[in-house]
């Protein structure tokens, strides 16, 4: 249907124009007959009154409106009385010729003086009154119609119908194109009428839809992360089997090498030779610790927990890291409070700080600085390892502790060091975090439960 396909504004324009047109016609044809009846009644009453007054032999009245009646007295010629009317008046002196309701003029001959009188009946006045009433009513209804249409189209409809519809259409378009900032209708324009209820309901529906959509996105991200972790776990399982096999193959020749070096130390003299052999012993011990670390990463083992003073642990970890020639080119500062201690395994904690210091050493340039600080905060001991290197790339930072994550491009980075460190810290009931320093460089924070001091 053509009308059904029109836009809302055109439909309303057609409807209220039709309504006012029908209303105007109804009022017009209702009032005009009433007005005509009233005027016709007044005309007949006046005609009877005029007839009665005209029949009396009084002098001509001197009313201000007497000109309306053209009331005159004189001879038949001066009054232009038709011949047949004269003859009738001569035969019927004192009587009135004419009907005031139908005729335009009344005539009468006065018996006392033999003069003639003529009176115009104002039928035209009443006819004009009806015409004026028609024009006035039509004009008033037209003005009311125009003012009503202007009020509707310029104030009421734009404010309460067209603007709400436009807001909903704009919001729907924003939803269609994915513009989340503009898909909600401003609450200032939502009223308590039916349109306002629809707008509020739409806002609520969009909110629930977006919440559901965000929840689905979050779940998809969690699913992707879970898939990635499962893949990582598969690789870790394979690494566990490989590391156990490698450790088994390395332990025997490593033990032989370690024993041989000890024998050489008993037979070789000279300070330089002894120093080299000691370094060889420490290297073989480092290899053994690396081998054990790989095995422990693949299968977590429970170590005996005792009270461990952290400052010596950090010093030992730096001694192991300092085998790298680069260590002589950087500044290492250990500001860990010698009094603080934690409940843990000394060897495992050394492994944690070896990995953290190794990463810091790889990050800094020659002349760089590595700073370790330790303090007590309530029931926790907080140790920070900070460097003034380039920092951790933003894309790596969220997953820095996952296995096989590395930002280094050389052969040194396996991506396991921080993952191993995180696993050991968690075994100690603590947590580890990574961030970038405001002035440049990275900072890794380890929080461990305080140790129990048995000396008191």
Image (spheres, rainbow, N blue to C red):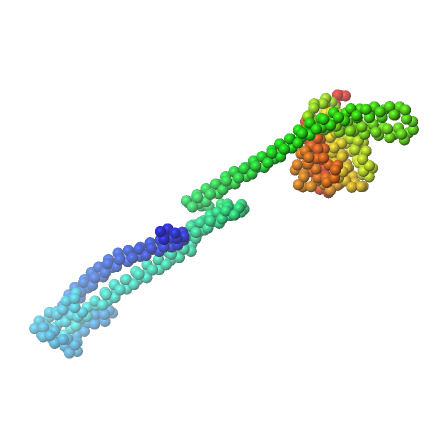
The quarter of the displayed image where residue 259 is located = top right
Residue at image point 67% right, 29% down: 238
Which of the two residues, 222 or 343, is positioned nearer the viewer here?
A: 222
Residue 254, percent from left and from top: 79, 26
Residue at image point 74% right, 33% down: 355
Residue at image point 35% right, 57% down: 145
**In this view, 271 is above or below 96:** above
Quadrant where the image shows the C terminus? top right
**In this view, 326 is above or below 97:** above
Which of the two residues, 147 or 222, is positioned nearer the viewer here?
A: 222
Residue at the farthest bottom position: 77
Residue 40 in sight: yes
**In this view, 31 is above or below 351:** below
Residue 217, percent from left and from top: 56, 38
Residue 341 in sight: no
| Left or right, 101 with reference to 387 | left
């Amino acid at each position: 249907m053509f009308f059904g396909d029109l836009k809302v504004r055109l439909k309303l324009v057609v409807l209220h124009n039709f309504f006012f047109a029908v209303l105007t016609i109804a009022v017009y044809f209702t009032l005009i007959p009433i007005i005509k009846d009233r005027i016709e009644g007044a005309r007949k009453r006046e005609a009877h009154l005029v007839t009665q007054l005209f029949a009396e032999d009084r002098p001509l009245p001197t009313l201000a409106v007497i000109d309306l009646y053209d009331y005159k007295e004189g001879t038949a010629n001066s009054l232009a009385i038709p011949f047949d009317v004269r003859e009738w008046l001569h035969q019927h002196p004192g009587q009135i010729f004419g009907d005031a309701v139908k005729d335009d003029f009344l005539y009468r001959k006065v018996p006392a003086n033999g003069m003639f009188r003529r009176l115009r009946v104002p039928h035209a006045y009443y006819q004009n009154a009806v015409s004026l009433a028609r024009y006035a009513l039509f004009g008033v209804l037209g003005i009311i119609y125009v003012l009503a249409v202007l009020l509707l189209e310029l104030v009421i409809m734009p404010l309460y119908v067209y603007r709400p519809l436009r807001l909903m259409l704009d919001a729907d378009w924003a939803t269609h194109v994915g513009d989340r900032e503009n898909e909600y209708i401003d609450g200032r324009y939502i009223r308590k009428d039916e349109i306002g209820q629809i707008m509020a309901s739409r806002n609520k529906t969009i909110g629930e839809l977006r919440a559901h959509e965000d929840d689905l996105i979050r779940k998809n991200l969690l699913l992707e992360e879970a898939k990635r972790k499962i893949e990582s776990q598969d690789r870790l399982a394979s690494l566990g089997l490989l590391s156990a096999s490698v450790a088994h193959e390395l332990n025997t020749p490593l033990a032989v090498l370690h024993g041989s070096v000890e024998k050489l130390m008993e037979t070789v003299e000279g300070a330089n030779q002894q120093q080299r052999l000691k370094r060889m012993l420490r290297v073989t011990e480092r290899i053994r610790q690396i081998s054990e670390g790989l095995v422990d990463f693949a299968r977590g083992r429970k170590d005996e927990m005792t009270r461990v003073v952290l400052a010596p642990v950090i010093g030992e970890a730096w001694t192991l890291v300092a085998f790298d020639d680069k260590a002589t080119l950087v500044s290492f500062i250990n500001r860990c409070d010698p009094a603080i201690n934690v409940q843990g395994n000394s060897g495992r904690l050394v492994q944690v700080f070896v990995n953290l210091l190794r990463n810091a050493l790889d990050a800094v340039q020659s002349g760089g600085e590595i700073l370790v600080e330790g303090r007590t905060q309530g029931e926790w001991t907080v140790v920070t390892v900070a460097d003034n290197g380039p920092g951790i790339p933003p894309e790596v930072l969220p997953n820095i502790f996952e296995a096989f994550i590395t930002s280094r491009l050389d052969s040194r980075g396996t991506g396991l060091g921080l993952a191993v460190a995180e696993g050991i810290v968690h075994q100690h009931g603590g947590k580890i975090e990574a961030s970038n320093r405001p002035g440049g460089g990275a900072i890794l924070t380890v929080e461990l439960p305080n140790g129990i001091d048995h000396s008191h």
